Amino acid sequence: MKQGYLDNSLIQTTSRSVANAHLGMLLWALIVGSSFPIVGMMSEGLPPLWLTAIRFVIATLAMLPLVWRQSGRWPSLPGLVLYFFMGLSLAGFFGTMFWAAHRATALSMATLYVSVPLLAYFFGRALGVERRASQLLCILIMGAVGALGLAWAESGGQTAKLQFGLAEGAFFVGCLASALYPVLTKWGLNHGWLSPSAELRTFWSLLIGSGLVALAGFVLEDAQKLISLTLTDGLLLLYLGVFSSGVTFWLAQRATAVLTPAAVMGYSYLVPFVSMLLLLVNQPQRIGWHWFPGSLMVVLAIVLLLKRDANNRRTTKLVPPHKRQQANSSD
């Protein structure tokens, strides 16, 4: 096993890498938002945890040709432990999400999920991978309010569906786990425990995550229901595994190397906006003025997020290199 990797916090990012990270996360939001209708096309009654585990296995196999010949493909012992907790974060989120989906309303779950970028910010502050940034916090709050507005519009303004109980509490624990995933990634990179390769980080976290999700499926679900999988289900699973899991996790891992965890997770606010655009195409009669405030706030939050990083890169270029090194060493 490798002893460790270069401390990634010392690697200077470039304007191009930051721009590519943002563009990648825009693609991430598009893929994730367009995946929900595809999931809805699958046969009913299939065990969701087992389906998620299969998706993760497919994604892992899709990443295998990209990592097989890479140097440093075997993680160190601290890296392996960290990958375990990253996989546990994935299993915790998907496990609680599917368990709560049959017991909580969609509005309640959407309301709780908007907390993930904010949680990532505070977790990042606690672990030293996020700097104090009131502007970023304000942008995240704006995006959260906008996403809540879209969730409210989706529910038809029926606030009675907003409930909180045991199921919602369990899903909030899953949201905590989801927020931890990019924070643990950034923390591991800064300590040199994780590979600088986004492909390797995606491979190992999905590999371990698939095993843990399958374990949850073994405990909570009936695996025999998988025998009702059709050829169409298999093809849909193949797409979801390669793109909705493999590509999206790789895009998020690539972005986490150059952006902060909260900035990466902030793109989750775009997911309901993408879903709204799909709804506009398929059911335009459902779209009214009540969708506009949330949409405007989400788009504005993403624009401000892009502008903030562009300004930060411009400011960094104006600072002499030896000053930047002193600032990094003091953080």
Image: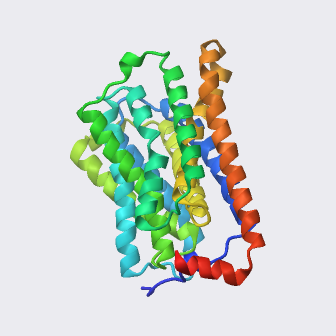
Residue at image x 76%, y 71%?
317
49 relative position to 255: left or right: left
319 relative position to 302: left or right: right
- Whether residue 41 is visible, yes or no, is no
> Is 234 or 216 nearer to us in this picture?
216
Snapshot colouring: rainbow
4 relative position to 295: left or right: left
Residue at image x 62%, y 36%?
298
> Is 49 or 2 nearer to us in this picture?
2
Could you say where residue 49 lies in the image, as x and y percent from the top left? Answer: 35, 44
Residue at image x 67%, y 75%?
12
- Whether residue 172 is visible, yes or no, is yes
Could you say where residue 197 lies in the image, as x and y percent from the top left? Answer: 57, 72
Could you say where residue 272 lies in the image, as x and y percent from the top left? Answer: 56, 33
Residue at image x 35%, y 32%?
101
> Is 86 or 324 nearer to us in this picture?
324
26 relative position to 222: left or right: right
> Is 221 or 109 nearer to us in this picture?
109
Give the quadrant of the N terminus. bottom left
Could you say where residue 259 lies in the image, as x and y percent from the top left? Answer: 60, 61
Answer above or below: position of 71 versus 110: below
